[in-house]
Amino acid sequence: MQTIGSIHEMQSSAIAMRSSGHLIALVPTMGCLHEGHGKLIDIAREKADKVIVSIFVNPAQFGPNEDFEKYPRVLSDDLEFCRERGVDFVFNPKVEALYPEDFSTFVEEEKLSAGLCGISRPNYFRGVATICLKLFNITRPDIGIFGQKDAQQLALIRKMVNDLNLPLEIIAGPTHRDSDGLATSSRNHYLSDSQREDALRISRALETARELVTAGVRQVDRVIAEVTHELSQSRRVRVIYVQVVDRDSMESPREIIPGRHLLTVAVWVEDTRLIDNIEL
Ligand code: PAF
């Protein structure tokens, strides 16, 4: 496995791999890798000849009062994880390399990134779209792998690839859950044991939503009300949003269509922001 920090070196290696006919998959990450990332890497290995994992905590997607500084950075563990998982290249650039002082070009999607997390995190999706386009240009992947847990991010990246005619395919990896049901996330590291207990309400509430739909409920408001009620049972959980959305457009439907719509939630568990979703 090769670890590359230089943009030029990564780009030249990717171009060389492509001209030798290799299919490249990119798994973009911010590090602190867990089994959820592991599963995305497995998909990448299955679909491509060469796997690149980028590890970069992207300042452009954090707001001024968010956790950029304290975001867990554990590079040597991450490199070991990637080595064990059969990754070919880790791309780990410095902030100054990707965002030099005179950097002033950003990518903005104007529709599906406006709602949900876009409301409480105003520049978040602009930062995500910008870094992903940069990573695609540097690593030249045929395939980009993104987790379904970040459903709005996944929809945004698909939209950007389509709108900007980028020559790659986006593949979604299913949400990976720990044995207690909590969706794996680097931010789970912030949770104490008792906060984790509270966080488990999220996956239970999502299951409730699915059970209601399986039982024939189609009213969006009814499902949202039940889920919000369940989440609000703990005083340490503060609901940011509970929404039923179309998986591609992120628009709210009038009525739930099973297999097409997602129930998405974002909550604070004290000072940790968590998101999750389930297909209804
Ligand atoms: O999902 C993430 O970890 C990040 O948003 C991503 C896609 C690596 C961009 O920084």
Image (spheres, rainbow, N blue to C red):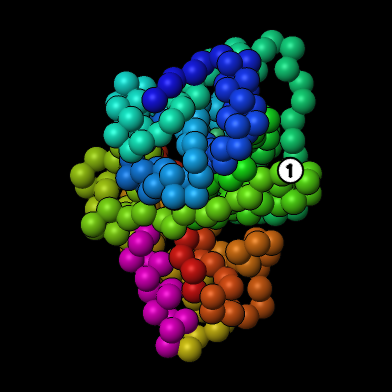
Write the residue at 39% across / 79% down.
211
- Within the magenta stretch, is there residue 212? yes
In the picture provided, is 268 more to the left or to the right than 28? left
Which of the 4 image quadrants contains residue 74? top left
Residue at (38, 74) in percent of width and height: 208
Write down the residue under mark 1. 166
Where residue 172 sits: x, y (%)?
Answer: 52, 54
Relative to the observer, which residue lies in front, 49 or 31? 49
**Residue 4 against residue 244 in the figure, above or below:** above
Residue 122: x and y in percent read: 65, 39
Number of other residues with Cα within 10 Å of mark 1, as a class: few under 14, some 14 to 19, many 20 or more: some
Range of residues picked out in magenta:
202-215
Height in image: 179 above or below 19?
below
Q: Quadrant of residue 38?
A: top left
Q: How many marks?
A: 1
Q: Quadrant of the N terminus?
A: top left
> 97 or 229: nearer the eye?
97
- In the rendered image, is residue 40 in sight? no
Answer with left or right where residue 216 lies relative to residue 198: right
Residue farthest along the left direction in this orientation: 193
As drawn, the residue found furthest toward the front would be 20
* Residue ranking furthest to the bottom: 216
Q: Main secondary structure of the magenta part?
A: helix
Q: Is residue 135 magenta?
A: no
Please give left or right for residue 131 compared with residue 53 in the image.
right
| Residue 206 image offset from top left, x and y in percent | 41, 67
Looking at the rendered structure, the kind of residue marked 1 is Leu
Question: Who is closer to the viewer here, 266 or 175?
Answer: 175
Q: Which residue: 47% across, 33% down?
A: 53
- Residue 163 visible in the displayed image: yes
Under circle 1, the secondary element is loop
